[in-house]
Image: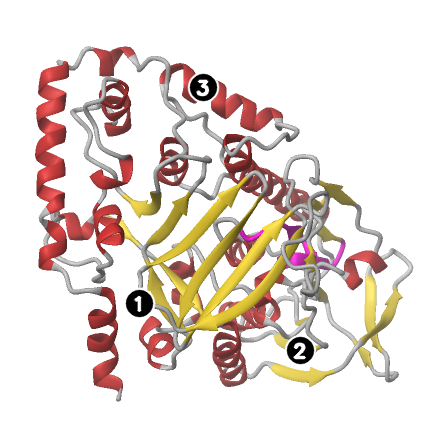
Amino acid sequence: MSDRAIRSVAILGGGITGLSAAAAFARALPQVAITVIETAPDPAALADRLPGSMTSIHRFHASIGLDEAVLVGAGAAIPRLGLRFENWPAGGEPWYHVHGDHGAPTGTVAFHQLWARARREGQAEQYHRYAAAGVLAEAGRFVHPQGDPGSPLTTFDYALRLDPERYREILASLADQLRVVRIQGSFGGIDRHGDGMVAALLLADGRRIEADLYLDASGPAAVLAEAVGGAFEDWSGTLPCDRLLLGEGPSSAASPNDTIVGGAQGWQFACPLPGRTMLGHVWSSADPAPDPHGRSLAIRPGRRADPWIRNVLMLGDAAIVLDPLHWPHLHLTQTAIARALDLLPGRDCHPVEIAEYNRRSREEARRMRDFQALHYLRAGASIEVPESLARTLQQFESRGRLPVYDEDSLPDEIWLSALLGLSVLPRDIQPLAAAVDPVVAATRMTEMRVGLAQLPARVPGFADYLTRVAEPRR
């Protein structure tokens, strides 16, 4: 290890966020001493409490050496194909937001261009019905991607639904295996060097934890960020929902989908987990509470203007706060951890790496904000429309194009699935797409739909598949 390299990391917060960071840093930097201070959990830390993820979770698990089969076998995770949206927009037919390819290009012409033209002419079914994940989600069936290249069963992706408590236990066990030190404590303050860098975390019982780098995984209270003076960028004008009521119901019929119902006046979700169903109601405090006697969580949408200040890095809800729509919390936590490792500076935490980290984080966060805001705008909510979202809508509604944002961690297919599912149709299509004969395009689209419609018959029901996957580990 060079004299300049980081030798020690202290992580404030022992929830999913803190333990994810501990496992990732320990795996990538086995020579670095890592200490996790397991503070009392913050009930408003949604990255630590909610069950949803995005497909990026597979890359993160691979980076820390966590096998999906272990998670499924322990009842900590089950696959999720998509989100079933009901009454969003109000009065619209249900649609599915799924991952992976939709249709296939015609030469260099993107499928969604030809689909949009056919849809305007009443000659196309819903967009998700041209995706393998979409037809499987609608039929309640699942299988892991497989088959020969070109098979529709290789063209889709899936996320995981996590049981937060069991998932945290597995992360804690992994951290122990990686020789991460875990201690109990509560935050009491910081001690600084003369240059403003944090010299030590001071715990309430008088202990002093020294490290080269400090990670704030304390939740939206962001106590370490507040101590070093991190500013907060408020997004409440763009994202209207600021209250969340969580509940639990009995185990429901096994489904590869989460269900989302509602829109501008608040919405509800149901997320089936092993042995139970997590329920949630999300709304604006400007509207009446759905349950006046329920104990809701406050959400303050926004982000830390600079999530990395000197030798303090904020992660999870300490860095960005969003509502649960599309389950963005764990995704942003994991991409932030990967970005931090990619740009890891020396012990001096040189401003060049810190500035680049903050720039990338800022742009990624704003695109996720735009993605959520798109849904509220289409639901009829009165919101402040960010310039970047206005540009996206202008480009897409004009010619079906998506503007390029380098730090957008959401693939184009995720944006397209949402835009077209929310009935945002281009007024016109690109000239190359317009040159494709409509009859030829319609015929090819029909062939795709017929082929995909036969797919569910070859795939087991979701409950049957989960039973089959779990059998070898009984």
Q: State the residue at coordinates (52%, 68%).
A: 24
The residues bearing labels 2 and 3 have C-alpha atoms spaced at a distance of 47 Å
Q: Is residue 356 left or right of residue 64?
A: right
Quarter of the figure with residue 54: bottom left
Q: State the residue at coordinates (74%, 71%).
A: 211
Looking at marks 2 and 3 on the same chain, the residue that comes earlier in the sequence is marked by 2
Using the image as rendered, state which of residue 409 and residue 246 is in the foreground. Answer: 246
Q: Residues within 10 Å of mark 3 (few under 14, many from 20)?
A: some
> Which residue is tagged 1?
254
Give percent across and percent down for residue 268: 51, 53
Give percent across and percent down for residue 56: 41, 55
Quarter of the figure with residue 20: bottom right
Callout 1 touching callout 3 (CB < 8 Å): no
The number of callouts visible is: 3
Q: Residue lying farthest right? A: 194
Amino acid of disc 3? Gln
Q: Residue lying farthest bottom? A: 474
> Which residue is tagged 2?
35
What residue range appears in magenta?
Answer: 310-324
Look at the image and tell me whether residue 314 can be seen. Answer: no
Q: Residues within 10 Å of mark 1 (few under 14, many from 20)?
A: some
Q: Is residue 314 left or right of residue 100?
A: right
